[in-house]
Image (tube, rainbow, N blue to C red):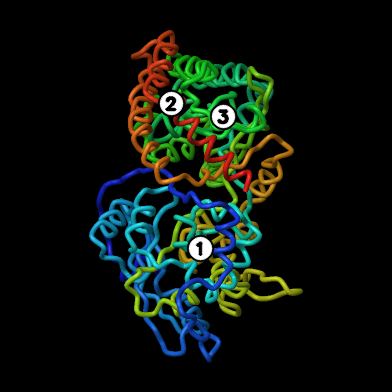
């Protein structure tokens, strides 16, 4: 396939920060979002397009690959009169974005990941165009905002400064417990219903396959603990717990409920049931172990299992990963995280642009029916057809990618469609047509009725709260990051946890909880 054309590459280091929102009331936010704003309105383009004259816009985006020759680019130009000149940053995009914002050298449009301090800084320092002032040029976004109030959590001082990446329709995925089900059958084992059952199953796997790594993970303790801690009745760092007082923010490691999580993981590590390299595995390294049959269980994105199953089939036609039903924890709960409906990544326009109305209309087009469909399916007659009023991917397109390692994502890369490419209002219906049937089966298991909980967007904070959180979390989160691996690998005994938990409290963990809960209570009352 012909990808990677005319790409511009950059590489720099990752920077994390605190989620940023405004201290304005929800009513003020929605009022601001739906009124015309303070800028003098400019008549809509006479052509009905975003611009009456052809424009070329520079867009900076983090992505590993997009086919820059995809027909979708010409289609977008045909419909909007705006030509996209795309600059792709394949590594360390967040640091690249940070540098651009710090030096006020924005292109026309750029992507800023959700929850980053640089988004707040850019908005407050006047680097981003205030979309609220041009909301009359964005009827599609305004309509969605009326229906989806969560979007307003991302506003700064009551104003919209970005076009957020939303989910029009999602094939629901989760950080699920995925296990080699064929080995359960082979060894005559029942699917684990509790975490003690899981321990026993992993132990049986290791006995039957001594060279295996029963449980693997990727990158660090944070990724290992986020889904596992919540499922076991606690949570990692600050998180929203729907089972405490009707819903409350809690700093997981500051409470005794977290201790069983460390007891469990440290026991797995000690008995060689947990990958010794879990903390340093790259995503690719983890996937290789699972796809090759070396590892037999993971607690991560369930959709990965489809690719692992395809990779395992040539050597063992019976091999298959399956999503386990949620396991009951020691508190009698069955619960797990499912990915939030909206990604909320920010697409911002430079305040220096000479064409603010045109660029706002351009980005708003992506939220309309025409733009949503095009960025999901591509170009009608080239990539899909309409049947009974619904888009259907052409057979030739299905066949082209059917034998690739990851049909859905390879198709999206070539067509420049979907979440990773150009979509802002992401429709994942094409995933059903191009993915293995088990993914659809797993989707039906990932529901609130089964115990899954949507990840929650943080509430809007005041400026003082943001400043205080930045100070507190730099201390508390750093302590957690420094010590979690030590507990898991046995360098620090789990018996020290109570002392460690008190250290977190002394460093401000409970104050972090207080700030989050007060901000959330304000938001809920509005």
Cα gap from disc 1 to disc 2, whole angstroms: 42 Å
Please provide percent x and percent y for residue 31.
58, 63
Specify few, some or many for label 3: CA neighbours under 10 Å numbering under 14, 14-19, or 20 or more: many
Point out the frontmost of discs 1 and 2.
2
- Helix, strand or loop at disc 3? helix
The quarter of the displayed image where residue 193 is located = top right
Q: Which label number is shown at residue 509?
A: 2
Is 69 above or below relative to 319? below
- Residue 423 vs residue 101: left or right? right
What residue sits right under mark 1 in the picture?
Answer: 412
Please provide percent x and percent y for residue 91.
31, 53
Is 221 above or below relative to 51? above
Residue pictured at 45% horizontal, 75% vertical: 39
- Helix, strand or loop at disc 2? helix
Point out the frontmost of discs 3 and 1.
3
What residue sits right under mark 3 in the picture?
Answer: 230
Please provide percent x and percent y for residue 309.
56, 43
């Amino acid at each position: 396939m012909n990808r990677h054309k005319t790409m511009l590459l950059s590489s720099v280091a990752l920077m994390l920060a605190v989620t940023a929102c405004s201290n304005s009331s929800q009513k003020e936010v929605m009022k601001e979002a739906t009124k015309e704003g303070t800028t003098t309105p400019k008549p809509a383009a006479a052509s009905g397009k975003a611009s009456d004259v052809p424009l070329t816009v520079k867009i900076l985006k983090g992505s590993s690959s997009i086919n820059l020759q995809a027909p979708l680019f010409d289609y977008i130009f045909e419909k909007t009169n705006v030509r996209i000149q795309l600059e792709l940053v394949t590594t360390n995009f967040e640091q690249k974005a940070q540098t651009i914002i710090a030096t006020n050298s924005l292109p026309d449009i750029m992507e800023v990941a959700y929850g980053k301090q640089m988004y707040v800084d850019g908005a407050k320092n006047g680097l981003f165009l205030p979309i609220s002032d041009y909301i009359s040029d964005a009827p599609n976004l305004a309509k969605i905002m009326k229906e989806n109030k969560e979007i307003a959590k991302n506003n700064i001082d009551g104003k919209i400064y970005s076009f957020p990446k939303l989910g029009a329709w999602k094939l629901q995925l989760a950080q699920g417990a995925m296990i080699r089900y064929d080995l359960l059958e082979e060894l005559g084992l029942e699917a684990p219903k509790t975490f003690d059952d899981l321990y026993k199953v992993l132990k049986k796997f290791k006995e039957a396959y001594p060279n295996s790594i029963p449980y693997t993970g990727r990158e660090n303790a944070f990724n290992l603990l986020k889904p596992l801690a919540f499922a076991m009745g606690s949570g990692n760092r600050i998180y929203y717990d729907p089972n405490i007082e009707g819903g409350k923010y809690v700093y997981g490691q500051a409470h005794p409920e977290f201790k069983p999580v460390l007891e469990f993981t440290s026991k797995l590590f000690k008995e060689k049931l947990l990958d010794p390299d879990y903390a340093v595995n790259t995503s690719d390294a983890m996937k290789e172990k699972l796809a090759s049959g070396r590892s037999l269980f993971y607690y991560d994105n369930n959709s990965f299992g489809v690719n692992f199953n395809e990779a395992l089939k040539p050597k063992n036609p019976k091999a298959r990963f399956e999503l386990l039903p949620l396991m009951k924890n020691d508190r009698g709960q069955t619960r797990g995280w499912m990915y939030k409906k909206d990604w909320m990544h920010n697409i911002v326009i430079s305040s220096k642009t000479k064409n603010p109305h045109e660029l706002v209309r351009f980005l708003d087009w992506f939220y309309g029916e025409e733009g949503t469909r095009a960025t999901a399916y591509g170009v009608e007659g080239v990539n899909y057809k309409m049947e009974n009023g619904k888009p259907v991917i052409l057979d030739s397109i299905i066949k082209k990618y059917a034998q690739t390692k990851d049909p859905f994502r390879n198709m999206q890369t070539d067509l420049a469609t979907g979440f990773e490419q150009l979509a802002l209002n992401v429709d994942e219906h094409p995933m059903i047509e191009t993915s293995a049937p088990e993914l659809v089966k797993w989707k039906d298991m990932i529901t609130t009725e089964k115990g899954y909980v949507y990840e929650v967007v943080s509430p809007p904070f005041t400026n003082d709260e943001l400043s205080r959180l930045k100070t507190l979390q730099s201390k508390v989160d750093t302590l957690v990051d420094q010590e979690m691996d030590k507990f898991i690998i046995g360098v620090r005994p789990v018996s020290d946890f109570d002392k460690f938990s008190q250290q977190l409290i002394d460093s401000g963990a409970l104050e972090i909880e207080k700030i989050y809960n007060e901000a959330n209570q304000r938001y809920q009352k509005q």
